[in-house]
Image (cartoon, grey):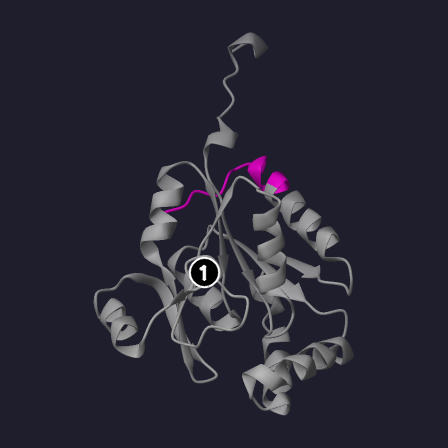
């Protein structure tokens, strides 16, 4: 076969599934909100939750807010790619959003805690798994302290959980530090990961 006969695979046409995880308070919501504001051509999956809506949050944009009975029914109907109870509230990744976006050829970004990321990786190890890390535990403690007024969750418990989650770093493909005051830089790094993975060979093939 001559070089003129070489046929390259169409790598751009195959969508990616990016799973963004990390400890509570690291800024996952802020990062993905910024990705949405920049009108990036990715589908950001809206997580379903049983926790109360916080001020400034929007139904169907930040989360899908469900009561416990409705959430439990969706679990029974296997409508979630993964779900878990976290600090007394349930969170689930709607399976239909993922499948529909991939069918349209769109890259999918899923937010999940570390436990959820492990579940998704078991289901589909061909996803791209990114751990969003704080610059330090001191910074994470500061962020969580600010959130205590609305979360009412024991700070020590969250920090202990974060310490355990850091031990799961080998499970992830990338670690991105979300620095103070550098939200756009974090988003740029995520976009760089997507671009690098788009030209990866052999390409990750999703099977859901």
| SS for callout 1 | helix
Q: Check disc 1: other Cα within 10 Å, few if <14, some if 14-19, many if 20+.
A: some
Q: Can see residue 173?
A: no
Determine if the magenta segment contains residue 204: yes
In x, y percent, where is residue 17? 48, 49
Most foreground residue, 171 or 196: 196
How many marks the image carries: the answer is: 1
The magenta segment: 195-208
The chief SS type of the magenta part is: loop
Determine if the magenta segment contains residue 152: no
Q: Is residue 11 above or below residue 38?
A: above
Instruction: Classify residue 81 as left or right of residue 23.
Output: left
Q: Is residue 173 above or below residue 116?
A: above
Q: Can see residue 178?
A: yes
In x, y percent, where is residue 16? 49, 44
In x, y percent, where is residue 73? 23, 71
Q: Is residue 5 above or below residue 68?
A: above
Most foreground residue, 59 or 50: 59
Most foreground residue, 60 or 79: 60
In x, y percent, where is residue 79? 28, 61
Residue shown at 27%/70% (left/top)?
A: 75
Residue shown at 51%/65% (left/top)?
A: 57
Q: Is residue 122 above or below residue 35?
A: below
Residue shown at 64%/50% (left/top)?
A: 190
Task: Please give the residue where the numbered disc 1 appears in the rendered image.
Answer: 121
Determine which quarter of the picture holds residue 152: bottom right
């Amino acid at each position: 076969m001559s070089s003129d006969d070489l046929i390259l695979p169409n790598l751009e046409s195959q969508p990616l599934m990016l799973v963004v995880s990390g400890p509570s308070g690291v800024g996952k919501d802020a990062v993905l909100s910024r990705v949405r504001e920049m009108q990036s051509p990715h589908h950001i999956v809206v997580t379903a939750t049983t926790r109360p809506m916080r001020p400034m949050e929007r139904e169907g944009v930040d989360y899908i807010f469900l009561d416990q009975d409705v959430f439990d029914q969706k679990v029974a109907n296997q409508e979630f790619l993964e779900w878990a109870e976290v600090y007394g509230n349930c969170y689930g990744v709607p399976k239909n959003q993922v499948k529909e976006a991939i069918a349209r050829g769109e890259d999918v970004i899923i937010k999940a805690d570390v436990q959820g990321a492990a579940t998704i990786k078991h289901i589909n190890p061909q996803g791209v798994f990114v751990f969003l890390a704080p610059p330090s535990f001191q910074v994470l403690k500061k962020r969580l302290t600010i959130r205590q007024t609305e979360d009412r969750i024991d700070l020590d418990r969250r920090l202990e959980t974060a310490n355990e989650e850091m031990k799961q770093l080998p499970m992830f493909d990338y670690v991105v530090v979300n620095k103070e005051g550098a939200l756009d830089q974090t988003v740029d790094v995520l976009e760089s990961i997507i671009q690098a993975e788009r030209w990866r060979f052999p390409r990750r093939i999703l099977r859901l």
